[in-house]
Each structure stands twice: as C-alpha cells, then as structure tokens.
Amino acid sequence: MTLIRTTASGSLPVTGAWREGNPLGRREFFALPGPLRLQGGASLPGARLAYETWGTLAPDAGNAVLVLHALTGDSHVAGAVEPGHPTPGWWNELIGPGKPLDTDRWFVVAPNALGGCQGSTGPSSLEPQGKPWGSRFPVLTLRDLVRAEVQLADALGVHRWAAVIGGSLGSLRALEWAVDQPDRVKSALLLAGTAVSSAEQIAWCAAQVHAITGDPAWHGGDFYDEPVGPNVGLGLARRIAHITYRSPAELDARFGHAHQPGEERYAVESYLDHQAWKLVRRFDAGSYVTLTKAMAAYDVGLDRGGVEAALRRVTARTVVAGVDSDRLFPLEQQRALAEGIPTSGPLRVVRSDHGHDGFLIETDQVGHLLTDLLDQV
Ligand SMILES: CC(=O)SCCNC(=O)CCNC(=O)[C@H](O)C(C)(C)COP(=O)(O)OP(=O)(O)OC[C@H]1O[C@@H](n2cnc3c(N)ncnc32)[C@H](O)[C@@H]1OP(=O)(O)O
Ligand SMILES: N[C@@H](CCO)C(=O)O
C-alpha cells in the first residue's frame, strides 16, 4: 500500500499500493454460496468473510459466542501482532483460557465485517472479473453485514449464539442481530452503541468521508491501481475520528497546551498525526468510506415501524453499557436502548477518563460485564 509518514513538515508518500483484503495470518475464510441480496436492492457476488475462532464448538453448538468489532477493528480479537495481523488483539485481556470470555468453555467467533479490509470482501477486493471493486462496490448497510454473518453462522453449524457481543460499530451490529434474528441470539452485550445515529454522529461521519473523497488521490474510489492512494484524506479522517474517540478532559490532562518537545507542533497534534499514520498503514480508504457511511445510515427502526417497535423484537437477555466520558456515543443513547429493549437490565456504566475508546481500554470493567452476561446464559 502507499504509506504516508506524517512529520512536523507535512506528509511524505512512502511506497506500494493497497491490495485486496489480507490473506495472511491466523484466520479462516467463508465464501458466501451465492450473491448476497443487499438491503438497497443490489446484490454482491463472490463475497467472503474472514473470521477467527477460539475454543471448541460443543456437540450441541450451544457454546458459540459471536464477537463483533468496531469501525477499524478486525477479526483479531485476541493474539499478537504477527504476519497478517498489524494490530494485537483488541480485547486480548478478555478472551482466552481462564479469561472473562473463557475459551475453555466458549467457542468464540469473530468475523471481519463485510466491506472491511482485513480478509473480508470490501472495495479493495477483486470482483469476479478480477479487477478491484473500487467505485463499483455497492452501498452496504449494517443489516447487510449481519445477513452475511448469518450465512457464516449457518456454515459453522451455529443455529443460536449463546451471546452476541460488540462495542461501538460492533454494538450496532450486535443489536441488528438481536432485532433481525431474535431466535438466534440468546444473550447480547451492547457496549457504547446506539439504536439510531444522531445528527451529530452523521455529521462526524460526513466530515470524515469528505476528507477522503476530497483527496485528489481518491480518484472517485478507483485508486487501487494508482501509485498513491488517498492517504492524506484517510489520515485527516482518522484525526477527526480520534478526537471523538477520546474525552476533552483526557486530552487536556495528557497534552494541555504543550508543544511536542523540539517541534513547532502541539503535542496533541503530534499524537493525532501518529494515530493517523498508524491507521493509514493498515486500513483501506475505500473500506473506511463504506463502513463509515453504513454507520451514519444506521437506524434500527428502518422498515420495522420505528425504533421502539424494532427494539421490542429483541428476546435476548441483554446487557446495555456505555462509557461515562463518551462524547461520540453518549450515555443517553445507551439509556434509550436499555429502556426500549424489553429484555434488558438497567444501563451499566463503565467509568473511564478515556471517552469512547474506554470500551477498548477499560478491560477490567468490560470483563465484569462479560462475566455477568455469560454467567446467566
Ligand atoms: C475494536 C477496534 O477498533 S480494534 C482496532 C484496534 N484499535 C485501534 O487501532 C483504534 C485506534 N487506537 C486507539 O484507539 C488506541 O490506541 C487504543 C484504544 C487501542 C489504545 O489506547 P491507549 O493505550 O490509550 O493508547 P493511546 O491512544 O494513548 O495511543 C498511544 C500511542 O500514541 C503515541 N503517542 C502518545 N503521545 C504522543 C505524542 N505526543 N506524539 C506522538 N505520538 C504519541 C504513543 O507513542 C503510542 O504509540 P503506539 O500506539 O504506536 O505505541
Ligand atoms: N478506536 C475504535 C473506535 C471506533 O469505535 C476504532 O478505531 O474502531
């Protein structure tokens, strides 16, 4: 892929070109048996999902747990950085033998979202004629992502998940599972999510999408055969997003008004540059746009008689939780979920200074939520 190394003086193109979803690493692939009919009316042929599993599926398939990642996450919930996996497991502390999601007991499945770039079919993938999908990749909704995961569950022999668990975008997908497939979800953990994207969330998403599509290197989405991809735009999108992932108080406490030592940049600016550079190295701009638009468009009540009616369809025992300093997915959104889902307990609150990313960072507290959920399954 083409890399951008961000420095005090600007952005320097490095080498290479983004290529189809990574085939390496500890992951397996499920090829959908036929074209996926999409909510928008189009269909997606030749799609596949990359996924990872931990533990052993019980003979009655009753111990299967589905874990769903956030916007730029992937199937690598647990494990080290290794060839094919550019980031360590994003819930390393939570999944494994003796951990809250104990893989001696549970069979854990984590798919890379359809539309993503870590093994599942997305805009950077090759379409049946062998060219990158690029601008021809269809619009996806979160319902489409879940319908692909339903086919994966069928292929794995999992009729009913003991639990479906997700944070952020993963929470929206978990909710979609619980509403769309109520008979197939016994319990659910909805962490730092919402039933419907707010105007502000749509606005954040729109700004990020414009940052990418406004980059001249975007080429209308057909940049995969170009020497340089829209990395400046993707980096800008990540900077915007990352501000929303952390709390103002945390940023102030960590960086204040200080400059990065020896540089003209502010320390917080340097931090954002670093986060941008890290994402640009490992993520496809086309997937970022596809998944960000799907998140912005999310409304669980669409075609279901509204949000209240949709939430009433949930039969899974549900734990809804949020992070108290989250300004991107504020607690009011999770409170509305907890109040609207008939089988939910009261809202659980994760205490954190870190904002939205608290769902990734506060693993002790999230571990308690998982234990509470799974102890009663
Ligand atoms: C579900 C998923 O999304 S999984 C995908 C994995 N998640 C992500 O990649 C999301 C992006 N990353 C993050 O949001 C965060 O890094 C988390 C949530 C994973 C971890 O949060 P924290 O441990 O609090 O890390 P933090 O946000 O402080 O970032 C630390 C990095 O910033 C760097 N940094 C800190 N201050 C500065 C500074 N002034 N200038 C430049 N870099 C800085 C650190 O060196 C460190 O770099 P490294 O990650 O390359 O080692
Ligand atoms: N840090 C998370 C936040 C979005 O929920 C991500 O990049 O996916």
Image (cartoon, rainbow, N blue to C red):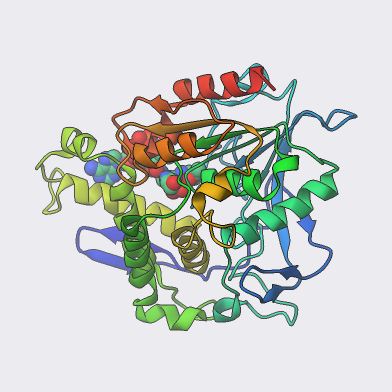
- Residue sitting nearer the eye, 31 or 87: 31
Q: Above or below — where is 152 with respect to 296?
A: above
- Residue sitting nearer the eye, 83 or 355: 355
Which residue reaches farthest right? 59
Q: Tell me where residue 3 sits by quadrant.
A: bottom left
Q: Residue at x 46, y 83 (%)?
A: 220
Q: Position of residue 303 (x, y in %)?
A: 58, 62
- Residue sitting nearer the eye, 270 or 201: 201
The quadrant of the picture occupied by the C terminus is top right
For residue 13, say whether it is visible: no
State ligand 1's quadrant.
Answer: top left
Q: Residue at x 65, y 47 (%)?
A: 177
Q: Residue at x 35, y 72 (%)?
A: 210
Q: Position of residue 340 (x, y in %)?
A: 50, 39
Q: Position of residue 376 (x, y in %)?
A: 66, 19
Q: Residue at x 63, y 51 (%)?
A: 112
Q: Above or below — where is 39 with respect to 161?
A: below
Q: Tell me where residue 205 sits by quadrant.
A: bottom left
For residue 198, say whether it is visible: yes
Q: Above or below — where is 273 with respect to 227?
A: above
Q: Above or below — where is 79 with respect to 221?
A: above
- Residue sitting nearer the eye, 310 or 100: 310
Say left or right for 69 vs 12: right
Image mark count? 0
Q: Position of residue 133 (x, y in %)?
A: 62, 77
